[in-house]
Amino acid sequence: MFETIAVVGATGAVGTLIRQMLEERELPYRKIKFLASQRSAGTTLTFKGQQHTVEELRPEAFEGVDLAIGSTPDEVAKEFAPWAVERNCVVVDESGYWRMDPKVPLVVPEVNPDAIENHQGLISSPNCSTTQMVVAMKPLYDASRIRRVVVSTYQATSGAGVKGQADLKNGTHAFLHGSAYKYEAFKHPIAFNLIPQIGSPKYQGYTSEEMKMVHETHKIFGDDSIRVCPTCIRVPVDNCHSESILVETERKITVAEARELFAAAPGIKLVDDLDAGKYPMPADCDGDDAVFIGRIREDLSSENGLAFWCVSDNLRKGAATNAVQIAELLIKTQAAV
Ligand SMILES: NC(=O)c1ccc[n+]([C@@H]2O[C@H](COP(=O)([O-])OP(=O)(O)OC[C@H]3O[C@@H](n4cnc5c(N)ncnc54)[C@H](OP(=O)(O)O)[C@@H]3O)[C@@H](O)[C@H]2O)c1
């Protein structure tokens, strides 16, 4: 049981889902508070039928708080996490800032729940494009170590927060009405377009988003030998990221075996019947906590390759659900001590 939970960044795209998640799931706590920037401080939001005033994020806001779930920009997470930890508050952080810190576990409960055990007050949740990929990789990895992954992402505009969501709607409206629109989250129009860049240039022609998929996958599996080649694309879809994934395993995994492995894996739902026109699509996966997999095929170009299509709600499993699952895991592991 937590005494007081703080939702940090409660007014954002992920923060809104965290609030919804805490209304839906049975995380035990006595009190809850909602923190955001000075811009939102003093505004009210409704939670479990009651009005709550949003407080400004300041060090003192963490007095008496024992769990904080943070969904803020990186530079804000850099600042607030130490304020909370100094006050004996455990932080589950969605931002990219702490993920690769060797002292901070990077956790996806279906993949590496044990990593939580040695936390020092701060636990990170991975990037949304990494989370759904590692959940999909896990049963294959356990059956026959994965040597290589080639992944192309088709990422929704909600991945860029409330400004990204607004850009798709307003940009589409402007396009259809022949009016001008100044994009805020994206540096190119996203309406009736796609953008083959997410994040900034980072390493040998790869972007920061792509390199997150490489480094975070290594950290979560504890296996730096997995070769990962990502291409991250922003597409004009409101919510749910899609990924075309090709894995090469140590021994051959047939389509039939892969179906069995995926079907038995926690957090995965299989929708795989090409003849019947059934496969995961963003519009169908929106609002669901699962990672959906379909279009499973043997690779025509390599011995032990397996290709599949993977869709997941980036605001849920890619962010809010994973963070709340980490909080639930904290309760479970503390209860087990
Ligand atoms: N969107 C996704 O699919 C996704 C998935 C995984 C991880 N993440 C990560 O989660 C974090 C939040 O993303 P988001 O999409 O929810 O962004 P967002 O919609 O832009 O929300 C940002 C939140 O942070 C708050 N904030 C901003 N500056 C602040 C400051 N100086 N002090 C206190 N609070 C501040 C905002 O409060 P105000 O409303 O007051 O400005 C808002 O509540 C990011 O680090 C992102 O990389 C996002």
Image (cartoon, grey):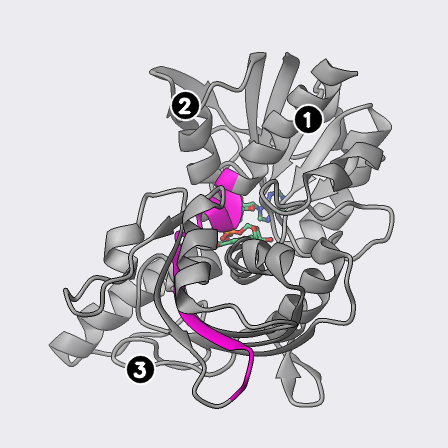
Is 323 included in the stretch rendered in magenta? no
In 3D space, how far apart are the residues under numbered discs 1 and 2 (Cα atoms)? 18 Å
Residue 235, position in %: x, y?
Answer: 36, 73
What residue is at 63 percent from the left and 55 percent from the top?
142
First in residue order: circle 1 vs circle 2: 2
Residue nearest the viewer, comparing 224 with 77: 224
- Where does the magenta region start and end? 302-321
Q: Are marks 1 and 2 in contact (CB under 8 Å)?
A: no
Q: Is residue 314 visible?
A: no
Disc 2 is placed on an element classified as helix
What residue is at 41 percent from the left and 45 percent from the top?
290
| Above or below for 326 versus 158 | above
Instruction: Please identify the quarter of the rendering in which residue 333 is found.
Output: top right
State which mark lies toward you, 1 or 2.
1
Q: Amino acid at mark 2?
A: Glu
- The residue indicated by pointer 3 is 193
- The residue indicated by pointer 2 is 23
State which mark lies toward you, 3 or 1.
1
Residue 204, position in %: x, y?
Answer: 71, 89
Mark sitting on residue 330? 1
Disc 3 is placed on an element classified as loop
Q: Residues within 10 Å of mark 3 (few under 14, many from 20)?
A: few
Q: Are marks 3 and 1 in contact (CB under 8 Å)?
A: no
Disc 3 C-beta below 8 A from ligand 1: no
Q: Amino acid at mark 1?
A: Leu
In 3D space, how far apart are the residues under numbered discs 3 and 2 (Cα atoms)? 36 Å
Q: Residues within 10 Å of mark 2 (few under 14, many from 20)?
A: few
Q: Amino acid at mark 3?
A: Asn
